Image (tube, grey):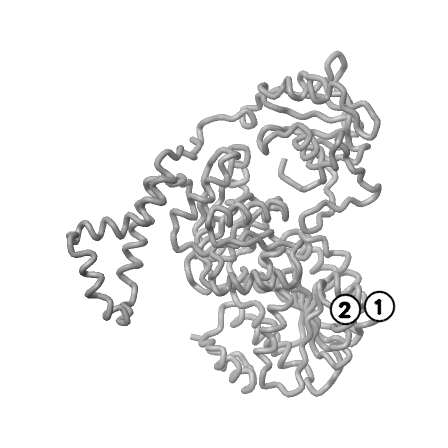
Amino acid sequence: MPTFQSLGLEENFLQAISDMGFVTPSEVQEKTIPLLLEKETDLVSLAQTGTGKTAAFGFPMLQKIQAESRTTQGLILSPTRELCLQITNELKAYGKYVDGLNVVAIYGGASITDQAKKIKQGAQIIVATPGRMKDMIGRKMIDISRIEYCVLDEADEMLNMGFYEDITEILSHSPEDKSTWLFSATMPKEVANIARKFMHSPVEISIGTKNVGAENVSHEYYLVNARDRYLALKRLADANPDIFSVVFCRTKRDTQKVAEKLIEDGYNAAALHGDLSQNQRDLVMKSFRTRQIQMLVATDVAARGIDVDDITHVINYQLPDEIETYTHRSGRTGRAGKSGVSMVIISKSEFRKIKAIEKIIQKEFVSKDIPSGMEICERQLLHLASSIRETEVNHEIDMYLEGIEEVLADFSKEELIKKVFSVEFTRFYNYYKNSKDLNVAAGEPTAVDAGKGIRFFINLGGKDDFDWMTLKDFLRDLLQLGKDDLYKVDVMSSFSFFNVDEKHKDLVLDVFRSFKLNGRRISVEISKDGRRKGGGRPAKQGKKGKRNKPNWGEDRPVFKGKKRRKHQRPNDKGTGGKRRRR
């Protein structure tokens, strides 16, 4: 069995490792550390979240830099503030016995002046988010012209967040002969492209197979109606009394909404998303790490900095827009050799994405039913019984036993058990006694799956700065329809098509009877076989199935080229443009 001593680390680092309680290196550390210590090389390392990647690049960088020099020699780019701070704290712990070591974190949401002062004091290693790093280079607050080592951590996530141009700009200020180490959980085309552009004959290390899920994480999906998604979430939480979980939503708005509803319903929950201040995020994460919060509702971007052990469940309240992101989500649980569960709550229209994810993670999902109310009551009672059995007796109660026994003298053992457990059972029984079955049979076709419904023509299209995602959101908000009530949105240059169930036909016609957008009359007509009523089939718009793909930020679309219009409704503020699945 390999040891840290066999990896070639110096004694001061071995002492730090001993202080932190590390015993044996992980697979990525065993393969990476000796390689980086022995030679100067570019590296692409593919490993899942939670496998010890920070130590894999941290120890070699710390051992190779000259701590007595005030020159910046190492740069580490990471996608989020949380991950940036996490890496910084870990490097400081690894280098606690290195005299003169200064590792500085550079990220948005904090004073740029204070960060510049820390850099001027002499920072051998800078850990930064791309946006703040690019800003400080532009202001000439940072000089990376002499760095020897550059790490791109969570490279796939940085590119998913739209940081490609920032990374390109930052690296243009660094020397070409530096060693670049790229670490990523998945290997999409974009990561391969950045490796080809910025690296020279990199050595590739893969822990497991590219893009696959962690071995000790099981994957489950629950099929419900879209309107029952929140009820399903609550039942899954109630059916797992010891749950310690991250609940993923796609947008900041949904994250905040779900967290607020959970808190109102008595759950220990909190939201984590980009609209929180750094202080708020720190407080939320502190509460989560100390388990004062059992259900952390988060966006994908905000969750990148979560490094918490023993997370029992990852719950995908909504599937991510990019299927590869599921790998990052499920990697929050099942860490350090422990088992975990990744749950997905889906509606019928999303079922096809399960098969797509299975191909990526190379694992099969297990179809499971949302527990019934009575099943939940049983699990809660057995959990209470186990808790009572495991509770250590506080003997300070002994002085009160006589009085307690007098009060309870008239009850038998069986009656006492019933009374104790009725405290918990009655609460759940009253809530769930008339609860409905939330499960949807996989064989029941919906209008979306069966291709039924009414198809409409509308005189809005690409020239109006719509793509199918933003048009779908615009129409759903305008018509006040549910997530699965509007589908098959196809956007052409000057017009588009969309489907709704037949029961919504009159609603659509009534809303658009006199509707205007920015003073322009918007026409909606029933279509047949892709034709405008009374007209011919529209001309093809470019290649079949090709749509412009916007450059997304954290949760909001960022459109290149023409400025996107703000779509106004009468007496309303507009619809916004959150990205959702078709």
Where on the picture, by quarter, is residue 457? top right
Seen in the image, is 91 located left or right of residue 133? left
User: Element at badge 1?
Assistant: loop
Q: Is residue 157 above or below residue 115?
A: above
Q: Position of residue 204 (x, y in %)?
A: 61, 64
Local packing at callout 2 (Cα closer than 10 Å; few below 14, some 14-19, many 20+) is some
Q: Position of residue 359 (x, y in %)?
A: 52, 45
Q: Is residue 559 above or below residue 194?
A: above
Q: Position of residue 562 (x, y in %)?
A: 84, 41
* Separation of residues labelled 2 and 1 (CA atoms): 10 Å
* Residue at image coords 69%, 65%: 77
Find disc 2 in the rendering and name its residue: 112
Amino acid, disc 2: Ile
* Residue at image coords 52%, 65%: 51
> Do the residues under discs 2 and 1 have CB atoms within 8 angstroms?
yes
Q: Earlier in the sequence, mark 2 or mark 1?
A: 2
Q: Which mark is residue 452?
A: none
Seen in the image, is 67 located left or right of residue 445? right
Q: Using the image as rendered, state which of residue 429 and residue 146 is in the foreground.
A: 429
Q: Which mark is residue 139?
A: 1
